[in-house]
Image: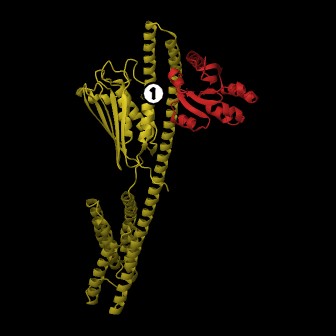
Chain colours: A yellow, B red
Amino acid sequence: MVHQQTYKTMHDAYLGQVKHKSDRLMNYFLVSFFITGLLLAFFYDTWLIAIGVGGLSLLAYYSTKLLLPGTGVYQYMVSVVFAIFMAQFIYQMHGLFEMHFIAFIGSAILITYQNWKLQIPLAAVVIVHHASFGYLQYIGYDKIYFTQLDYMTLQTFIIHGILATVVFFICGLWAFQLKKLNEHQIEQNFEMGRFQEEQLQKKALLKSNDELKKSNKELDSFVYSVSHDLRAPLSSMLGVVGLCEMGTLDPFMQKNVTLLKTSIKKLDGFIMDILDYSRNSRLELDRQEIHFTDLLTDISGNLKFMGAEDQRQVDIRTTIRNGVAFYSDKSRISIILNNLISNSIRYQNPEAADPFVEVSVEVSESAAEIRVRDNGIGIDRENQKKVFNMFYRVSTKSIGSGLGLYIVKETVEKLHGAIELRSEPGKGCEFSIRLPNLPLPPKN
Amino acid sequence: MEYKYNKVMVIDDNQIDLYIAEMVMATTGFTGKTICVGSAKEALAYLKPLYENPDELPDLIFLDINMPEMTGFDFLNEYQHLPENIRKKCIIVMLTTSLDEDDRKQAEGNQFVRKFLNKPLDRDKLAQLM
């Protein structure tokens, strides 16, 4: 199955990319600020400030980044550093008013991280700087450079403050909106990707399902025609053997012909078992209403004459109680009943007075309970579990292919049912089968 | 000797099955005359000219299903276009090794088919047609 990207991994990958790209840009900006400080030092010979404050700022930033790499703390540090550079440049230019714009440059640069909160440290440091330095210059403190104006009214100061705040606010807003927009885009991409993936999977599933159906069908028709081609010459043999039987009164010949007939029938039965097995495992359920009375009449009609020459005819009794309609797969139920009833005929008890097999069916809303009980030779406890195994035959006297009850079990399972066996040697067998009622889905 | 059917036709591509059918019917006194044909085409060629002479038509036809060129069902399709006096006289019985439920249903649903039997033909199966 294709690995499906979760929304979170896509989101995190995008944020990681933004962070990585912005971090690289920050290196250039910070170095540029530092170099700018050095260039400004020429004006008033402020080398100590340029190297000292600028260097400490860079040191603060890179050590934070190095010590707390997983967190976003170093990004806030950038914000602080920008504010400090602004203060440094104002000082270096002895209060040149245009140096105040450095704060706006910093604010604009921070948008790249798409995090509005990064504006806060910058704004905070700027406010503290303005308030303290402005006040200190105002009270006439020497060596403090805030503005080149001799006197700054409170009104000017407030307008200055408001405008700066508006710039920080707008830059924060853009960062916020950029992030929202990108998240929305990621979400859409994710939904689109998921949709496409689902479509692809659905398509692949449908295709492989079709292929499977086709190959099952092909295999079924292959098994069917092979079994037909195998059975056709067998039935010719049986016919010719029948002619021999009619044409001789010699007991030796008659005995041999009977043996030949038994062998041919056994082989034929084996082929039919394989056909049943193949059809059960390959064909889909073909649900239809089951009329047990008709079905059992058909089956017992076909099996009536089946026993060996020296066996007695087995009385097939049926009791059916069906108040409600029962739906299942007719040919599969037929396989089950055919196998069980023919077993009862094959393994009849020569000592029993009247060999019989009793089939009772009770249909309810939810299921059909089918019981097939006989007074045959029975199966001892040890073998009861194994009789459902493939190719397992109870004794050397067993006549069949060893597939019959295995097919019965497989078929019952295919119909989502369950089968149980109770038996006492010498008394007989009882198979109880429970098949769920599988009504047709309502047609639209 | 009194026969149940005067004349019986067997249509089958398998020579051995034709022989079996002929012998079984001969030894059981089922019919006086058996016509064996190896294909459905041959059967139609035999039947068609007899519409003016219905007494010569078979009373019963055993028809195989799986045959090359023209299957038993193809034969039945052609058969329904034959003149009515032919269709009236002949009873058709399917005789096949097919176990296919669909084959059985299709055959039993056909108006001309009286019975569906599995090969080989023997005394007991003939008794069902008596």
The spot of residue B5 in percent (x, y) is 62, 24
The spot of residue A52 in percent (x, y) is 28, 69
Residue B84 image-quadrant placement: top right
- For image coordinates 38% across by 24% down, the residue present is A313
Residue A309 image-quadrant placement: top left
A390 or A55, nearer to the observer: A390
Query: In the displayed structure, does residue A213 sit left or right of residue A438?
Result: right
| Residue designated by label 1 | A272
Is B76 drawn above or below residue A91 in the view shown? above
A100 or B109, nearer to the observer: B109
The spot of residue B17 in percent (x, y) is 58, 20
Is B33 drawn above or below residue A251 in the view shown? below
A204 or B117, nearer to the observer: B117
Q: Amino acid at mark 1?
A: Met
- For image coordinates 39% across by 80% down, the residue present is A167
- Quadrant including the N terminus of chain B: top right
Query: In the displayed structure, does residue B39 sit left or right of residue A223?
Result: right
A343 or A443, nearer to the observer: A343
Query: In the displayed structure, does residue A294 sit left or right of residue A375?
Result: right
Determine the secondary structure under disc 1. helix
Residue A266 image-quadrant placement: top left
Q: Is residue A291 visible?
A: yes
For mark 1, does the 10 Å Cα neighbourhood hold few (<14), some (14 to 19), or many (20 or more) residues? some
